[in-house]
Structures are given as C-alpha cells and as structure tokens.
Image (cartoon, helix red, strand yellow):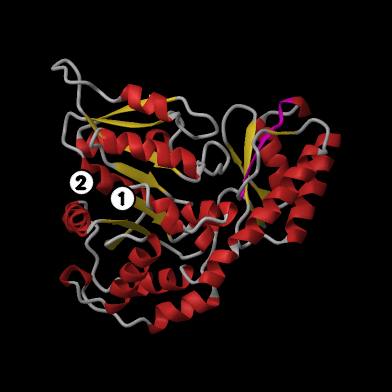
Amino acid sequence: MIDLRSDTVTKPSEEMRKAMYDAEVGDDVYGEDPTVNKLEESAANILGKEDALFVTSGTQGNQIAGLVHCKPGQEVIMEAQAHIFLYEAAALSAFAGVQIKTLDGNNGAMNPGDVEAAIRGDDIHQPETGLICIENTHNKAGGAVIPLKNMQKIYQVSRDHAIPIHLDGARLFNASVASRTPVKEIAKYTDSVQFCLSKGLGAPVGSIIAGSSEFISQARKWRKRLGGGLRQVGVLAAPGIIALEEENIQHLEQDHENAKQLAEGLQNIEGIVVKNKVETNIVLVDITNSNKTTEHFINLLKEHNILTGAFGPNIIRFVTNNGITRNDVNNVLLAAQKIVNH
C-alpha cells in the first residue's frame, strides 16, 4: 500500500526500534530519565533555546504554550487557516480560556501590518492580546515555508507591544531543509516553539517544546496537569534522539523532491490541477475537472493500493514521507492517469 494520507503514518526505522529496546530509562517526573534528558538538551541546543521539554504530541505542545503565555480572557492572533484554529478541537478556548482572532494570510503568512492592527488597545470592552502564533511550515497552505523576513517583521511587532510569539513548527525541519536555513535561525524569532519528532522525522511518537528556562519550568507543570507526566519515557525519547541526527534530517530533502516530481506529473494529467507551489512534502490537487467527486476519486486510488485524504471540497492532499519511494510516485501517476481516462 502506498500511503500518502500524511507524514504521520511513517514507521520508525530499525535503528530507532533498536534504540527503544536498549534505552536507559528512569522516572521522568522525577527528572531521572537520562535518555529523555539527553533528547531535551539536544533539542534545546539545536533550536538555540535555554531549555526544552518532551511532550506527547504537537497539539499538547501548542496547548501548553498557550497555557503558559496567556491568561483567561485574553486573545490569541493567528492565521485563519492555522492548524491550532482548525484542527485542535478549540483546545485553547477549552483549556486556556482564551479566544482566537484570525487573520487572512498569503500562502500561510500573515501580513505584519495586519498583525499590528489586530493587537488590542487599552479598552475595557476588548480582551488583551496575549499571544501571536505562527505556523511554519503551513499545513493548510500546502506545506508552505513562511519567509524568514516575514517572521522577523512580526517578531519586531511583538517586541514593540511586549507580546510573546509561539511557533507551531510541527514541520519546522521541513521548512529548514527547504529554505536552507538552520532551525536556530528560524526559532530565533519566537519565544516558544513546538516541533514534531514524528511526521517527516520518523519517530513513532512525541514532540518538543522549547523556550526560556522559566517557560519550560511552567510548561512542565502544565504538562503534569494535562496528564502528560510520563515515567520510563526513555523508550520513546530514544528514537527522538535519532530523529534529530543530521543524516535523518537531510532525508527530508528526498521527501521534497518526491513531492515535486509527483506535483509535476499530476499537473500534466488533464482534469487535475495542482493548487499549491510545492516547497516541501505536501501536494494539494483540485480534481473538479476530472468529473469525479473527491470521495470517488479517493476510493478509485484506493483500488490501486494508494491512500490519500480529502482536504476540502474537490481537493485531495498527497503527503510524501520516508516510506515513499520514487517508484511509488511513478505508480501514483500511472494510477491517476488511468482514473482520469475512465
């Protein structure tokens, strides 16, 4: 089966599995798991932050950041198609007691002027602005890389108004590889950052949040409150250490190349339109002119042993990952051509 539904379907490598088996462990709630301590130290160093914390998922990491940065009754600014807004079950409202103010972006990037204009003034009728969130890469924009200059300008706005910035960097390393920019340089324009060890990096589970030592101290307590205090977590942290090795990170470039080849081939099939500029590992395809519904098209792909997912009316999302080969890409193109022809 060729699984292009998401890069969350990646399987840990044999090296990761062996590392899990051999991992030295201890009780992490007591701070005594040497493997998770090593992972957190490594992640903080790579990101250029004072400290880091292993959490169970990207969503948990984003929620913890909101809980640390915000007070109930405040407002959080983010792009209108942000993952935190669309796909995290209104958790910031449910847990942190804040509301979200969305801004229409351009390919996932908010206009810094719009961000500044959205910051609330001193008015008793309005909530205070407690946080600004950026997503890089931007999932709904087809894995778009947010330009560093855009992040710099929004960061300056945040400094002028003393408002923290959180980066939902679930696919941060995809952004780094695609833009040839060290993650430390991207993370520099944030107060806190979350990235997934799973997805393209291939670990089976877990994410990292990072920031100042004070931020992580508060984050650790919020993780405990949310039931995320784990015990012998080294068995999960061990593959995360391998995920952050340079050789593993550079493998993302192959995922990007496969996505670009897939997009080029799909664009050449009559009735299919590629909707996004493919910068990383996500391809968004409009099948309106194929005379098939999204559900029908996806089911026909499944008959060819290809799994994809709907991403809106008439839109199908293909996500390359480390389980996809160049030969798989060719087979997808052949199947898509057959489906359109019939």
State whether residue 131 appears in this view: no
- Alpha-carbon span between mark 2 and mark 1: 10 Å
Q: From this view, report whether residue 108 is shown above or below residue 214.
A: above
Mark 2 surroundings within 10 Å by alpha-carbon count, few (fewer than 14), some (14 through 19), many (20 or more): some
Amino acid type indicated by mark 2: Val
Tell me which residue sits at (68%, 28%) in the image: 293
Determine if residue 69 is in view.
Answer: yes
Quadrant for residue 28, please give it: bottom left
Tell me the chief SS of the magenta region: strand
Query: Which residue is labeled 1 in the image?
Result: 192
Front: mark 2 or 1: 1
Q: Position of residue 241 (x, y in %)?
A: 42, 72
Position of residue 316 measured from the top left corner of the image (x, y, whole percent):
64, 37
Kind of residue at badge 1: Ser
Query: Across the whole image, how many numbered discs are drawn on residues?
Result: 2
Q: Earlier in the sequence, mark 2 or mark 1?
A: 2
Q: Secondary structure at mark 1?
A: strand
| Image quarter of the N terminus | bottom right
Whether 292 is drawn above or below 334: the answer is above
Tag 2's secondary structure?
A: helix
Check disc 2 and report the residue beneath it.
Answer: 68
Residue bounds of the magenta highlight = 281-288
Look at the numbered discs 2 and 1 and tell me whether their residues touch, using CB distance below 8 Å: yes
Residue situated in front as seen by the camera: 172 or 120: 120
